[in-house]
Image (cartoon, helix red, strand yellow):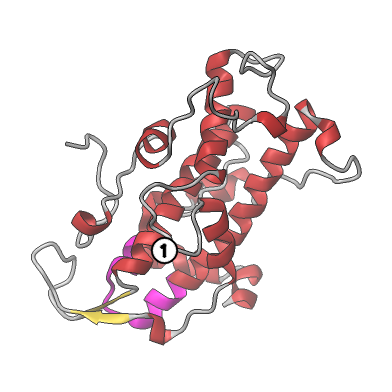
Amino acid sequence: MNASPPILLRFNEIVGLFDEPLHTSCRKFHFPYEPPNDKDPLSHYGVLSDGTFPDLSLEETDILRDVVIRWETRHTACPFGTRYDTIKAYATFFSENYYDHSSLTQIVPRPMSRYSSTCWSVGADTLMAVGHMSLGIVQILETLSGFWDPSMGSAFVLDPRFKFLQILEEHHDPSVSLLALQALQTRTSIAVKRINAYLRYLQMRYAPGEIDDSEAVESLYSMVSSERAVFGQESGEEELGKLLARPQYKLAI
């Protein structure tokens, strides 16, 4: 039995997502790294032959290794269908894909539903893919932010408490469902850039010869701390309203 809380309600038995630590999902959804037979996932980031970075312990290096495994290696549950096998690949596709009301389907209430009337959902397949992607991105950004900035001042949370994902699971208003989907697309695009920026920083720090020296690391600050501190405290609909007030989301949606 999983000790972590389930992220979804109605589709939990089908999708099986839990709000768990990154290392738990690494063991559950990715092939184990077994040296010396396996190539080190950190090999192109400048890891030493002993499996560590020059100024980091093995435990600290393992944290970064789990991040790269989670982001860049095959997801064994195959939640993204046959076209995409990594969170990184699906996140890039998802952020650029087109969705409209035809992407939603009507569902009738069930015992595990949040609503007692007919609702709208993206359906189990999309929920499976977007859910696994969202969980992975949340874990990765939380880990990288905590690693490089223990104060968490630069933390970007893709979907606080997975409220947008829960709207995609079921909601009585299809327009809200579609807005949540499109807002999550915009936030995924931001998240992909931030993860890539963190990993470029890692590469520039330990393997500068692997990348173009002229390539600048993007800012890791998406909003000021005071804004981030209050984001995610309200209902999914209220948080969606906050995002729609921002020019970036108005243009995207």
Image position of 167 with respect to 120: above or below: above
Residue 172 belongs to magenta span: yes
The image shows residue 110 at horizontal and vertical percentages of: 11, 69
Residue 107 is drawn in which quadrant?
Answer: bottom left
User: Which secondary structure dominates the residues rendered in magenta?
Assistant: helix
Q: Looking at the figure, which quarter contains the N terminus?
A: top left
Residue 11 is drawn in which quadrant?
Answer: bottom left
Q: Residue at x 68, y 19 (%)?
A: 53
Residue 235 in view of the camera: no
The image shows residue 99 at horizontal and vertical percentages of: 48, 79
Residue pointed to by mark 1: 81
Image position of 112 with respect to 139: above or below: below
Residue 84 in view of the camera: yes
Image position of 105 with respect to 238: above or below: below
The image shows residue 127 at horizontal and vertical percentages of: 35, 64
Q: Nearer the viewer, residue 34 or 111?
A: 34
**Where does the magenta region start and end?**
166-180
Residue 113 is drawn in which quadrant?
Answer: bottom left
The disc labelled 1 sits on which kind of residue?
A: Gly
